[in-house]
Image: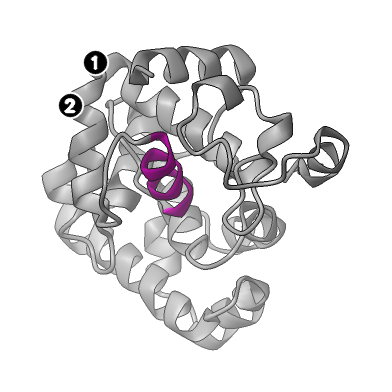
């Protein structure tokens, strides 16, 4: 089955798909994305209001007491490493980019701890620059769809980019990620309740009972 058919079905199923991290600026999205590593968007959204209230600018966070930052972000996990990461990013933004988060991939990945995935999240959602976000959900689902046979983020990113025009990259990433969080789970996908069941080559790997499958569907922001 064509990648286009699957993508069209996902677009129809998730017209409201968007970044589920709360942010008001490129700087806030950059920090939230870093904090979301090995955590959930809901948990990140529970700590960032206080984080952004206390240190609303790169300049403010660059001079923050690490212990105070760590106390606020502790619920997201790995808080000591993440404290060092976000303070380091703030200092780099101040020192290298005059306090403004850069709007290009080449510049963003020069920030400490910022890779292509994080950069693409920021570019696509804060700057309107098309990009594919190869997070764990997108990697898992694109392999199940048969679009790629690799778990390497860079390989997955390039494969999806080759299949679709740039204007679809950012929104398609959201749609796939939403489907992965809600239906196509890592351990027990809800195949019998899946809107693309008839299109998916991996339709038989998950729950086949429609009633049971329906109970597996999650709403992460509920």
Q: Which residue bears the numbered disc 1?
A: 165
Question: Which quadrant of the figure has residue 86?
Answer: bottom left
Q: Which residues are magenta?
A: 136-145
Q: Tell me the quadrant of the picture where the C terminus can be found.
A: top right
Instruction: In the displayed orientation, state which residue is furthest to the left.
Output: 106
Circle 1 or circle 2, nearest the eye: 2
Disc 1 residue crowd, few under 14, some 14–19, many 20+, Cα 10 Å? few
| Main secondary structure type of the part rendered in magenta | helix
Q: Residue 151 location, x and y as percent?
A: 30, 56
Inspect the magenta stretch and tell me whether residue 144 lies in it: yes
Residue in the image at 28% along x and 26% along y? 130
Which of 22/100 is in front? 22
In the figure, 145 relative to 109: above or below? Answer: above
Q: Quick check: can you spot residue 98? A: no
Q: Which residue bears the numbered disc 2?
A: 162
Provide the secondary structure element on which disc 1 rests.
Answer: loop
Q: Tell me the quadrant of the picture where the N terminus can be found.
A: top left
Provide the secondary structure element on which disc 2 rests.
Answer: helix
């Amino acid at each position: 089955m064509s990648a286009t058919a699957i993508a069209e079905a996902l677009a129809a199923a998730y017209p409201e798909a968007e970044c589920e991290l709360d942010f008001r600026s490129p700087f806030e999205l950059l920090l939230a994305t870093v904090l979301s590593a090995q955590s959930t968007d809901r948990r990140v959204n529970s700590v960032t209001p206080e984080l952004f209230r206390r240190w609303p600018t790169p300049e403010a966070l660059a001079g923050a007491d690490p212990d105070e930052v760590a106390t606020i972000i502790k619920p997201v996990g790995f808080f000591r490493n993440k404290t060092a990461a976000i303070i380091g990013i703030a200092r780099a933004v101040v020192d290298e980019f005059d306090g403004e988060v850069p709007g290009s991939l080449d510049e963003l990945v020069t920030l400490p701890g910022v890779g292509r995935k994080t950069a693409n999240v920021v570019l696509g959602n804060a700057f309107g620059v098309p990009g594919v976000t190869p997070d764990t959900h997108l990697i898992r689902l694109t392999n199940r769809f048969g679009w790629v046979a690799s778990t390497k983020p860079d390989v997955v990113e390039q494969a999806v980019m080759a299949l679709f025009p740039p204007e679809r990259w950012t929104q398609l990433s959201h749609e796939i990620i939403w489907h992965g969080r809600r239906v196509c789970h890592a351990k027990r996908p809800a195949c019998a309740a899946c809107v693309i069941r008839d299109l998916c080559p991996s339709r038989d790997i998950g729950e086949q009972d429609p009633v049971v499958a329906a109970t597996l569907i999650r709403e992460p922001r509920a």
